[in-house]
Image (cartoon, rainbow, N blue to C red):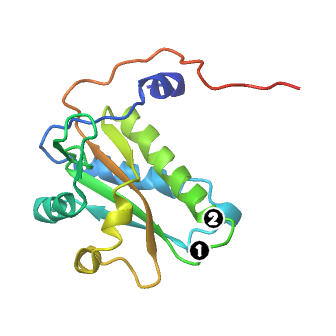
C-alpha cells in the first residue's frame, strides 16, 4: 500500500472484531513507534505498555467507562479493541514536549495499522480517569516515574477501511 492510500484510508475505528491481532502485526506497530520523531531524539523518556489480556482490558473498560451525552447509554472508551497500547513519559517538561512525542508515536502506529488493514483509534479522554486507579496502574507495570499521556487501540475493524476524500476543512493561511 502506498503512502497516499494509507493517508486516505486512515480513520478512527470505533468497532472491532473480537479476535486478537497477529503477533507479527503487533511487532510492526511497535517498530513503527520506534521510528517516531522524538524531541532531541530522546527515546529514553518514552515508554510503551501493550495490553492484550482480555481480563485486564475489561477492568480498564469498567474503570474508565463513560456515558453518551446523546443517548445516556454507557460507552466503551476502548471501542471493543483487543489491543491497547499506552504511551507514557517521564521527566515531564514545562513545554509539554512529551505530549508531542506521544502524538508522533501514536501517529506512526496509526499509519502502520492502516497499512496492515487494521483499524485504530487515538485514546485520550478516559486516561485522566485511568491515572486515578492505583490498582490498575500497578497491574499495568508502568515503570516508576512514568505517567500515561496517551493511548492507542488497534484491531481488526468490523467494517473494512474505506478511502475518505480530502476534507479541506482546516483553514490555511499563506503569506
Q: Which disc, if any, is residue 92? A: 1
Mark 2 → mark 1, Cα distance in angstroms: 7 Å
User: Residue 51's quadrant in the figure?
Assistant: bottom left
Q: Residue at x 54, y 16 (%)?
A: 166
Determine whether 70 is above or below 90 in the image.
above
SS for tag 1? loop
Residue 62 is situated, as x and y percent measured from the top left of the image, at: 16, 60
> In this view, which residue lies farthest toward the bottom?
144
SS for tag 2? loop
Q: Residue at x 46, y 28 (%)?
A: 6
Q: Quadrant of the C terminus?
A: top right
Residue 27 is situated, as x and y percent measured from the top left of the image, at: 34, 54
Q: Is residue 165 left or right of residue 86?
A: right
Q: Which disc, if any, is residue 96? A: 2
- Mark count: 2
Q: Is the residue marked by circle 1 packed among few (<14), some (14-19), or many (20+) residues within 10 Å?
A: some
Determine whether 134 is above or below 23 in the image.
below
Residue 121 is situated, as x and y percent measured from the top left of the image, at: 36, 42
Q: Quadrant of the N terminus?
A: top left
Q: Is the residue marked by circle 2 packed among few (<14), some (14-19), or many (20+) residues within 10 Å?
A: few
Whether label 2 touches label 1, CB < 8 Å: yes
User: Residue 163's quadrant in the figure?
Assistant: top left
Q: Nearer the viewer, residue 53 or 71?
A: 71
Amino acid at each position: 500500500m502506498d503512502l497516499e492510500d494509507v493517508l486516505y484510508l486512515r480513520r478512527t475505528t470505533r468497532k472491532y472484531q473480537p479476535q486478537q491481532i497477529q503477533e507479527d502485526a503487533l511487532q510492526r506497530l511497535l517498530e513503527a513507534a520506534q521510528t517516531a520523531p522524538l524531541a532531541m531524539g530522546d527515546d529514553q523518556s518514552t515508554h510503551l505498555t501493550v495490553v492484550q489480556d482480555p481480563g485486564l482490558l475489561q477492568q480498564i473498560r469498567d474503570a474508565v467507562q463513560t456515558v453518551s451525552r446523546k443517548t445516556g447509554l454507557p460507552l466503551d472508551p476502548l471501542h471493543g479493541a483487543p489491543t491497547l497500547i499506552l504511551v507514557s513519559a517521564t521527566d515531564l517538561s514545562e513545554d509539554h514536549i512529551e505530549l508531542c512525542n506521544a502524538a508522533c508515536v501514536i501517529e506512526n502506529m496509526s499509519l502502520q495499522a492502516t497499512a496492515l488493514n487494521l483499524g485504530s483509534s487515538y485514546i485520550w479522554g478516559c486516561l485522566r480517569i485511568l491515572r486515578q486507579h492505583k490498582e490498575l496502574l500497578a497491574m499495568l507495570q508502568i515503570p516508576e516515574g512514568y505517567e500515561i499521556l496517551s493511548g492507542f487501540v488497534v484491531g481488526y475493524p468490523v467494517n473494512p477501511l474505506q478511502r475518505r476524500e480530502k476534507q479541506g476543512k482546516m483553514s490555511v493561511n499563506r503569506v
